[in-house]
């Protein structure tokens, strides 16, 4: 579904990603791991078109999308929930969700999806008129994911969904994420929390200082203490 | 069969939202027009004149709010667009006899043209909109400080054109003879309509997307929000509303002078906008009302009145000083303004809920 072929990304004079190749097949959950500053977010930004690709090609559903702007990429079915507090604190939950459907023109479909997701996540219906900033961290992350879903994506990319959340909430969020696959979504999840991400992912890539260090199945990485130690570091055990 | 359900749900989302906006706008407009009605019924003639000035300022501030409040880009060009609305209305509406003495060398054969009151208004506001669109094409390519500096440049350029294109705008001399057809009633109706437009825009999908991009540009872009296109729409709509303020100004006073559309107007309305709260339509009403009253009180103080038997000294310039102080204080203490981004109907609903729970 998504093919990233020898892609490099520059930030000004600094090269953030060096000739990285990765792929995501339909129905998969793929995780992109690595320490802070490894170029994970740059990779996502290049895929969604927020930063230009310096070298290489990004192909989505067989078509080269290097030259498309973000709007067109979202319209083709790629969506990202950016890193950090992704929720617009000044907007209500309702407005956040409508925003997710910014590129859609089928009002009927938007309304139908909204109902479906509000049924799936009743807490959002409860908080419908409240400002996004009044939600708890976990609720905000849930809102960010559902907002991304409102664009009707085929490929959903999540940037650090566990960031700043309590461990039991992280569990919930990852259950939500893996549940999305059953709804026909394909996922690319950027994480620092390798342990959690590997529980749900099919395949994993590890980036370090902008270079691809590992590509393989999540199983491989999970079961090999050496690999974990080598690439993810001592902090995670 | 099932086809009825999605339609109902669509109504639930879009229709209900629109209804809520209209309801909110009605409450805000009732508040804004209510003050004017009280002044009309019980006020002195000079207080009615002050109210008219306040309504014109309110329309101008609403024009400012549509762009600045939603896109969160500081704008200083709005008096320029007001001036365009005022001058163009005058040029079209002034009777030919007067026009021959005012601008005998009028270009484009405008010296031979006289339109009706409504046609002049429509033509003036449309041309203002076109000029706003042309400037907007450049503006939306910039962001942050660069964009604000450009709005300042636009104000200076428009003013320069008024002052130096003597054949069309009479330079620094006043343009007079415009039919005085607008009174406080016209102002109240126009204000109510503009409040409705501003609120509908804020709550529309475009408004939501703009406000999102104002909080976090990158996140909004990642969702496919086309920030440039949306800013352009807001800029043109805001410019048109400022043009309306200008046209009404000309039809009320009957005379137009370029000085009225320069820095003083920019800072006065900016202070109003900031005091009330930029993100809220209600904030525009509150800011204009408070500063209009305050400026009138200050005007009395400036002339050194006798209070409780004590002769106070003359305090010229107190008004400008106070505007500066208000901007500084609000920015330091409550950068979100008095309304803090809330609308009157939202505040009322909140109190109503609390009151019902308490009782």
Image (cartoon, rainbow, N blue to C red):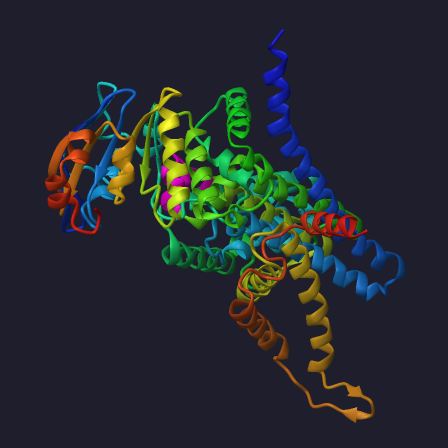
Q: Is residue B324 above or below residue A70?
A: below
The picture quadrant where one finds residue B175 is bottom right
Q: Nearer the viewer, residue B70 or A60?
A: A60
Magenta segment, which residues?
Answer: B217-232
Q: Specify whether A205 is left or right of B242.
A: left
Q: Residue at x 46, y 30 (%)?
A: A101
In the displayed structure, B353 sits above or below B153; it is above
Q: Is residue A48 left or right of residue A222?
A: right
The N terminus of chain B sits in image quarter: top right
Q: Is residue B145 above or below residue A164?
A: below
Percent position (x, y) of residue A163?
34, 47
Q: Measuring from the top left, give residue B359's x and y in whole percent.
A: 81, 51
Q: Residue at x 27, y 29 (%)?
A: A68
Foreground residue among A199 and A207:
A199
Residue closest to the far bottom: B310
Q: Please tell me whether residue A169 belongs to the stretch shown in magenta.
A: no
B193 horizontally vs B14: left or right: right
Judge by depth and name the residue closer to the eye, B262 or B337.
Answer: B337
Can residue A77 be seen here? yes
Picture quadrant where residue B269 is located? bottom right
The reply, left or right, for residue B343 in relation to residue A3 is right
Residue extending farthest to the right is B42
Q: Position of residue B339 (x, y in %)?
A: 63, 57
Please count the marks in the image: 0
Q: Position of residue B44 (x, y in %)?
A: 86, 65
The question of residue B224 being in magenta is answered with yes
Q: Main secondary structure of the magenta part?
A: helix
Whether residue A57 is visible, yes or no, is: no
Residue plotted at (25% across, 40% down): A195
């Amino acid at each position: 579904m998504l093919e990233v072929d020898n892609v490099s990304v520059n930030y000004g004079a600094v090269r953030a990603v060096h000739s990285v190749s990765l792929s995501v097949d339909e129905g998969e959950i793929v995780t992109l791991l690595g320490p802070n500053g490894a170029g994970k977010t740059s990779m996502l930004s290049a895929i969604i078109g927020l930063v230009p690709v310096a070298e290489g090609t990004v192909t989505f559903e067989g078509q080269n999308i290097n030259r498309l702007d973000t709007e067109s990429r979202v319209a083709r079915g790629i969506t990202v929930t950016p890193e950090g507090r992704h929720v617009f604190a000044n907007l209500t939950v309702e407005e956040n969700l409508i925003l997710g459907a910014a590129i859609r023109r089928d009002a009927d479909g938007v309304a139908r999806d909204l109902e479906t997701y509000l049924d799936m996540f009743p807490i959002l219906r409860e908080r419908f008129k409240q400002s996004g900033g009044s939600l708890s961290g976990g609720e905000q992350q849930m809102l960010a994911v559902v907002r991304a879903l409102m664009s009707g994506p085929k490929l959903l990319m999540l940037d650090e969904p566990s960031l700043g959340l309590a461990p039991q909430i992280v569990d919930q969020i990852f259950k939500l994420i893996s549940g999305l696959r059953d709804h026909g979504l394909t996922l690319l999840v950027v994480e620092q929390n390798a342990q959690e991400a590997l529980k749900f992912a099919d395949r994993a890539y590890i980036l370090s200082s902008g270079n691809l260090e590992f590509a393989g199945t999540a199983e491989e990485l999970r079961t090999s203490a050496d690999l974990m130690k080598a690439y993810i570091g001592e902090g995670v055990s | 069969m099932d086809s009825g359900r999605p339609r109902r749900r669509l109504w639930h989302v879009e229709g209900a939202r629109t209804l809520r906006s209209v309801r909110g706008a009605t409450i805000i407009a009732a508040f804004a027009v209510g003050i004017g009605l009280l002044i009309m019924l019980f006020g002195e003639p000079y207080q009615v004149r002050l109210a008219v000035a306040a309504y014109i300022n309110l329309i101008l501030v609403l024009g400012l709010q549509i762009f600045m409040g939603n896109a969160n880009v500081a704008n200083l060009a709005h008096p320029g667009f007001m001036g365009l609305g005022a001058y163009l209305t005058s040029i079209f509406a002034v009777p030919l006899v007067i026009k021959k003495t005012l601008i005998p060398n009028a270009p484009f054969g405008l010296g031979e043209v006289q339109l009706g009151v409504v046609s002049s208004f429509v033509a003036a506001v449309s041309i203002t909109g076109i000029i706003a669109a042309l400037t907007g094409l450049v503006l939306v390519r910039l962001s942050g400080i660069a964009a604000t500096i450009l709005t300042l440049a636009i104000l200076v350029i428009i003013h320069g054109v008024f002052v130096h294109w003597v054949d069309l705008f009479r330079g620094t001399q006043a343009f007079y003879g415009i039919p005085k057809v607008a009174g406080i009633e016209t102002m109240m109706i126009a204000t109510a309509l503009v409040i409705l437009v501003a609120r509908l825009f804020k709550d529309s999908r475009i408004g939501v997307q703009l406000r999102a991009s104002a909080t976090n540009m990158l996140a909004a872009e990642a969702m496919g929000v086309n920030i440039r296109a949306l800013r352009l729409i807001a800029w043109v709509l805001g410019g048109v509303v400022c043009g309306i303020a200008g046209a009404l100004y000309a039809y009320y006073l009957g005379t137009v002078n370029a000085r009225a559309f320069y820095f003083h107007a920019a800072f006065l309305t900016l202070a109003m906008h900031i005091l009330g709260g930029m993100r809220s339509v209600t904030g525009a009403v509150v800011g204009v009302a408070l500063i209009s009253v305050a400026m009138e009180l200050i005007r009395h103080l400036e002339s050194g009145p006798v209070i409780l038997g004590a002769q106070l000294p003359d305090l010229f310039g107190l008004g400008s000083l106070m505007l500066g102080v208000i901007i500084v204080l609000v920015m330091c203490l409550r950068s979100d303004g008095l309304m803090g981004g809330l609308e009157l109907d939202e505040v009322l609903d909140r109190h109503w809920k609390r009151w019902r729970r308490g009782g």
